[in-house]
Image (spheres, rainbow, N blue to C red):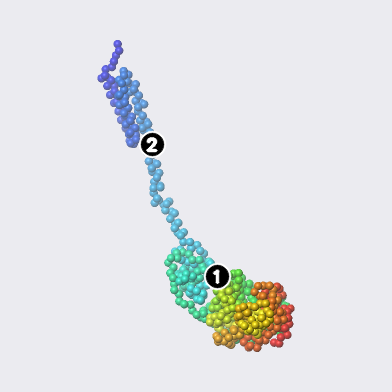
Amino acid sequence: MTHRCSRPHARSLVLVLVLILLALVLASCRSKPTPTKSAQVARVTATTLPVTATVMPPTASPLPTATALPAATALPTATAIPPTATSLPTATAISPTATPTQAPTETPMPTPTVQPTVPPLPTAAATATPDAAIVKVNADIINVRSGPGTAYPVIDRLDGGATQKIVGKSEDGKWWQIAIKEGNGWVASELVTAGGPMQGVAVVKAAPPPTAAPQAQAAAAAVGGPAPRPSGGGSFGYGIQIDPWGDRGAAIGAIKNMGFNWAKFQLPWKDFEGQRGQRNWPDDIIGDLNGNGLNILVSIVKAPDWARPGNTDRSVEGPPADPGAYASFVGEFAARYCGRVQAIEVWNEQNLDYEWGREPLDPARYVRLLAAAYGAIKRACPNTVVVSGALTPTGAPPPVAMDDFTYLERMYQAGLKNYADAIGAHPSGFNVAPDVPGGAPACDFIRGQGSLYVGPCNSPHHSWSFRSTMEGYRNIMLKYGDGNKRIWPTEFGWAAGWTGQPGYEYAKDNTPDEQAQWTVRAYQMMRNWGFVGPAFLWNLNYNQSHPGSELAQWGIMGRPAYDWLRGMAK
């Protein structure tokens, strides 16, 4: 007969199974770490399995289902969750980024110290600090003035690359006031580069510039001590300019053969002091001329590049930035040749832009140069005659030129009378005879000659006339109380035989015989005037040393003029 289990027995079995399951769960809790919320969820799911088992139909052999507990005890799966749940290292890995105050993020802070761009500028004399406005000198050398303009005297000098602290600026913004060791000075903004914080630089109102004459006195005093008062410039003499680098022996013989007693040559300063302080000297030229009994006039011109200002045009010749640099050279020259060189001419045709670096034509500035040179020459050799730089006769307007009468008057207003023994002049003749005045008479003369060049008619002016130029200078000298001095014509003459250079077409109108006749007549006029010193014809021998050049048109070697002058009564 078939045996059936009673319902009470089945229930007892189920209860036993539940108790066993609970015991297993409790044992697991004691041996494992406290699970996370996820593990607890998994365990709840696992412990519900007996409930599922309880819904199974009561079969005679339910135990196999109950013994499947090992499968139901998926606790190893639940216990595998803690590594995932304990993934806090992932969270803690954020901490280096989350702590920006650590030293590694603070070390870049020195970067702001590179803000000032000016301190790297090299200078030994810089007084600027990284937070100050400064200037850096762009030119080789510049002047520092007492005020914001070229009318103020030079009080110091700065070399190229030097930097100085800015303490103010001019009202027009064209000048910076800077700190120097003696106080404050001014530099032109176009010659420097400004840098640093500029917002705090205030406008400084400067006093009016001093008059020109005191400036010249300061320039003379700057090269040391008082100099002798100017003399009257000697007496009349017969001179001629030569090319000293040509056949010098032939030139000396020709001068002596004419019965002349003066020779002139031009000395380019730039060729004898190309580097500051490295000077060489024309001992051979001076020795040859002086050794043959000739008096010597040397015109010293053309500043070397290192001495010129930053605003100059280096394609043409020009003056130095500092008068003292020129004075130092001519002073040593005068000392070296004292007693052998009788006269020095300070510059040449400074009323022309291409002789003045195409800088603003400035008679007062020239007088400062003259004053410095005069003092240096006279202290070195008191008997040397100092001749002011001869002006070129012209009516052309600035900026190309300045009328020579106007320029001469302004030189006097700047103190010329105190710094020259003689007044230089270049009375040109063009195609007008020496005794013909300028203006209408000159125009009438060239029309009567049938001249092709009619400049004296197109623009009537004294500069076309040798006579009008000389008489005009004399009248200006008398006006300024300088009548005891003589005019030294350091160049004069007439060109003949045009060589094709534009601007010299008047040479086509002059024959070699007219060149000879007019030159002799000019010497006679000057000797008779009584206010002329040695007169130097331009020129003896450039037609041989530079044939075909503009210079050659005036040369007299091998021409009638040479013979006429040799036979002229002296």
- At which x and y percent is residue 261? 68, 83
Residue wearing tag 1? 311
Asked if residue 160 is positioned above or below residue 19 in the image, the reply reads below
Quadrant hosting residue 393 = bottom right
Please name the amino acid that badge 1 sits on: Asn
Quadrant where the N terminus is found in the figure: top left
Secondary element type, mark 2: helix
- At which x and y percent is residue 438? 62, 82
Q: Residue at x 47, y 69 (%)?
A: 173
Q: Residue at x 51, y 74 (%)?
A: 150
Q: Which of the two discs, 2 and 1, sits closer to the camera?
A: 1
Q: Residue at x 57, y 81 (%)?
A: 405
Answer left or right for 259 relative to 157: right
Answer left or right for 198 relative to 302: left
Q: Nearer the viewer, residue 317 or 154?
A: 317
- The circle drawn on residue 83 is 2
- At which x and y percent is residue 197? 45, 64
Please name the amino acid that badge 2 sits on: Pro
Residue 69 appearing in the image: yes
Residue 489 appearing in the image: no
Quadrant where the C terminus is found in the figure: bottom right
Secondary element type, mark 1: loop
Answer left or right for 18 relative to 242: left
- The circle drawn on residue 56 is none
